[in-house]
Image (tube, rainbow, N blue to C red):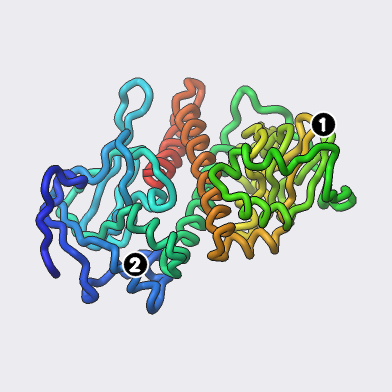
């Protein structure tokens, strides 16, 4: 290895060595993001990784500061602590060799949600976001494979955390109403045109922000258009995911069953999780991780939506065309918004005065997992 002297303040406060990667440097084999790579993809990722070392007590990440990249631990342990409302400090997790911190920062800019401190001497690898995004821009197999693995991990994490949240009733929950079986859109007409020139509106929607005109057309050409009346259902929980949707006009409400005691218990209430207006992506998580819908969606006012069928979505999402890269970025942004919303919900539930002590411990554990991942 060749040592590199860094001038000025290091972005990794407390790092005692930062060395340039060589072909002989090994990756943490226990980490699934590296284990999933083979051959050239593995070498491409190692080429941008920097070995780093931290002394006990050094700060790897500080809550509230911008994220810079991901740490892959080879030796040692770190501890994550978060400040809760009211000034309380909570140790939320400990991560050891083979763990990873901050992998979501490889996808999007963000803010550290916890302060991560070395609880022993630590050796690991650091991959900076900007270096990783260069690989993505080159359509590197390594970058796309890691990007997909991080996205799958995030989908699984959000599903587990939402299940934990929905096992604890809140005062605003409504009585549960069983959903009909089957696809509510099975007999709904698919359109190519509507009563207004919807394509003129696409470039100003958040989903298509910063897209090139030809990439928007590439996606739109593969979509059908749906017109829903207020109260019409888009999909129900525990049904097969057949497409994802982008709202053009109107708003879609998302609600999920609340089952006190866990997801296997019979639901007693339902909770509105979100209202998604124009330019929001809906139903994508179930397509990415190949699961049934966990919530139901319906029009809370008259709506116009783009419908992208499952096969076309997956082809685009797993591809490396310009339109694919745009879609991947939009999906990552949508997932990060979901994570931020989940974080707020968890913090609120932790601080509800009527939450029993046992439930508070469970919610704090769920918050710990979410905060550490968001870092």
Nearest the viewer among 64 and 99 is 64
> Residue 251: which disc?
none
Give residue 241's position: percent from left, percent from top: 71, 55
Q: Is residue 223 above or below residue 39?
A: above
Picture residue at 72% right of the left edge, 40% below the top: 297
The answer to whether residue 331 is left or right of residue 368 is: right
Q: In this view, does 215 lie above or below 198?
A: below
Give residue 321's position: percent from left, percent from top: 56, 63
Q: Find residue 137 and report its image quarter.
A: bottom left
Picture residue at 82% right of the left edge, 51% below the top: 183
Secondary-structure class at tag 1? loop
Look at the image and tell me in which quarter the N terminus lies: bottom left
What is the crowding at mark 2: few (fewer than 14 residues within 10 Å), some, or many (at least 20)?
many
Q: Name the residue under label 2.
A: 45
The answer to whether residue 54 is left or right of residue 126 is: left
What is the crowding at mark 1: few (fewer than 14 residues within 10 Å), some, or many (at least 20)?
some
For the residues labelled 1 and 2, the Cα–Cα distance comes to 49 Å
Q: Name the residue under label 1.
A: 230
Give residue 78's position: percent from left, percent from top: 25, 49
The answer to whether residue 127 is left or right of residue 137 is: left
Mark whose residue sits in front, 1 or 2: 2
Q: Can residue 260 be seen in this view?
A: yes
Q: Are marks 1 and 2 in contact (CB under 8 Å)?
A: no
Q: Which residue lies furthest to the bottom in this view?
A: 39
Look at the image and tell me in which quarter the C terminus lies: top left
The answer to whether residue 285 is left or right of residue 79 is: right
Q: Is residue 176 above or below residue 244?
A: above
């Amino acid at each position: 290895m060749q040592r590199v002297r860094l001038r000025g303040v290091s972005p990794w406060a407390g790092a005692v060595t930062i060395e340039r990667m060589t072909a002989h440097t090994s990756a943490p084999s226990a980490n699934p993001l590296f284990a999933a790579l083979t051959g050239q993809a593995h070498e491409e990722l190692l080429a941008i990784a920097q070995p780093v070392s931290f002394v006990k007590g050094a700060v790897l990440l500080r809550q509230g500061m911008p994220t810079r990249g991901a740490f892959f631990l080879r030796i040692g342990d770190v501890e994550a602590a978060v400040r809760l409302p009211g000034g309380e400090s909570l140790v939320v997790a400990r991560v050891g060799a083979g763990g990873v911190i901050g992998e979501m920062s490889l996808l999007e800019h963000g803010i550290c949600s916890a302060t991560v401190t070395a609880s022993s001497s630590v050796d690991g690898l650091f991959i900076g976001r900007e270096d990783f995004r260069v690989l993505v821009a080159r359509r590197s197999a390594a970058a796309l494979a890691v990007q997909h693995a991080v996205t799958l991990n995030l989908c699984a994490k959000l599903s587990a955390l939402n299940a934990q949240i929905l096992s604890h009733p809140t005062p605003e929950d409504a009585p549960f109403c069983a959903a009909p079986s089957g696809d509510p859109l099975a007999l709904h007409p698919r359109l190519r045109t509507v009563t207004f020139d919807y394509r003129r509106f696409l470039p100003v929607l958040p989903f298509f922000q910063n897209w090139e005109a030809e990439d928007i057309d590439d996606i739109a050409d593969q979509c059908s258009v749906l017109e829903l009346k207020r109260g019409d259902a888009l999909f129900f929980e525990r049904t097969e995911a057949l497409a994802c949707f982008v709202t053009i006009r109107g708003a879609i409400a998302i609600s999920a069953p609340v089952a006190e005691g866990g997801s296997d218990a019979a639901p007693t209430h339902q909770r509105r999780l979100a209202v998604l207006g124009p330019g929001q992506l809906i139903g994508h998580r179930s397509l990415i991780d190949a699961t049934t819908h966990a919530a139901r969606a319906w029009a809370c006012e008259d709506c116009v939506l783009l419908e992208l069928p499952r096969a076309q979505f997956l082809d685009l999402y797993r591809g490396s065309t310009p339109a694919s890269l745009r879609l991947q970025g939009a999906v990552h942004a949508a997932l990060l918004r979901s994570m931020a919303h989940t974080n707020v919900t968890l913090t609120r539930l932790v601080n509800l005065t009527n939450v029993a002590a046992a439930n508070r411990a469970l919610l704090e554990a769920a918050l710990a997992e979410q905060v550490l991942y968001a870092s």
